[in-house]
Amino acid sequence: MKITSVRLLGLAATLTFAGVACGSSSSTSSTPATTAAATATTTAMAAPSGSMATFGSACADVPATGAGSFDGMSKDPAATAASNNPVLSTLVAAVKAAGLVDTLNGPGPFTIFAPSNDAFGKIDKATIDKLLADPTGDLTKILTYHVIAGQQLDADALVKAGSEKTVNGADVTITKSGSDYMVDGAKVICGNIQTANATVFIIDSVLQPK
């Protein structure tokens, strides 16, 4: 059963209430996944790779000007940049609830696969409720499966690598079919978005750890 648009907005509101603001100085969760992310950012630094031109149908939904535009996002770290992009409001709420804001706003660099609001809309209510019941457990495991620490990789570099280890500890697989870039079966709908510390790919489905 797909979540209706009203239920999706309710999810974002519920998650936001449970989380912290992106500009907060509150400490993050001390779960192993969060600790691994913080450690990776200081041990495996790498410069952005390859051509960084944005691409994909959802790029048209990114604001043309302001903090949520491509130019605006490039000036802010990942969590703050995402909070200014209306396409990613549910993801941002989930990141707040899991206590990962400070980690994703850290020095990086990161490569991030960011599910759109519609991607979260594909998840049934029972699963959402279960994730909300333990945001630093399964929710954190899922979110950290969307992050590669230590590298800012563009789409072509990801396809060339074929797979990359995520902060979750499991590998994510990246392929290309025609002009479509796929991440574990999820389609990249806007890729190569730059933030101050990350390269972001908006995807049309929420990835599930293997």
Image: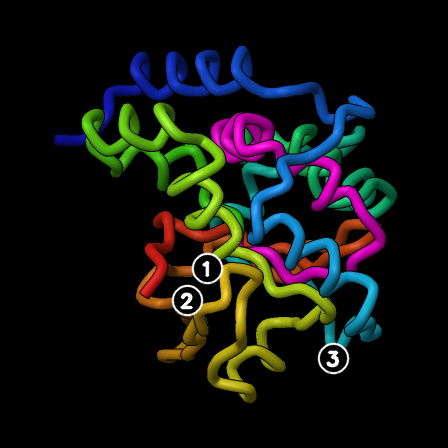
Circles 3 and 1 in contact, beta carbons < 8 Å: no
Which disc number belongs to residue 33? Answer: none
Say if 73 sits above or below 149 in the image: above
Q: Secondary structure at mark 1?
A: strand
**For the residue carrying disc 1, how many other residues have a C-alpha within 10 Å: few (<14), some (14-19), or many (20+)?**
many
Left or right: residue 15 compared with residue 25: left
The span from disc 3 to disc 2 (Cα, nearest Å) is 18 Å
Left or right: residue 116 compared with residue 53: left
Which range of residues does the magenta coloring cover?
90-113
Foreground mark, 3 or 2, reads 2
Circles 2 and 1 in contact, beta carbons < 8 Å: yes
Instruction: State the residue position of label 2.
Output: 183
Circles 3 and 2 in contact, beta carbons < 8 Å: no
For the residue pair 205 and 169, the one nearer the viewer reads as: 169
Query: Residue 118: horizontal and vertical position, in percent?
Result: 36, 36
Which disc number belongs to residue 188? Answer: 1
For the residue pair 150 and 1, the one nearer the viewer reads as: 150
Foreground mark, 2 or 1, reads 2
Query: Residue 200: horizontal and vertical position, in percent?
Result: 63, 55
- Amino acid type of disc 1? Val
- Amino acid type of disc 2? Val
For the residue pair 46 and 114, the one nearer the viewer reads as: 46
Instruction: State the residue position of label 3.
Output: 50
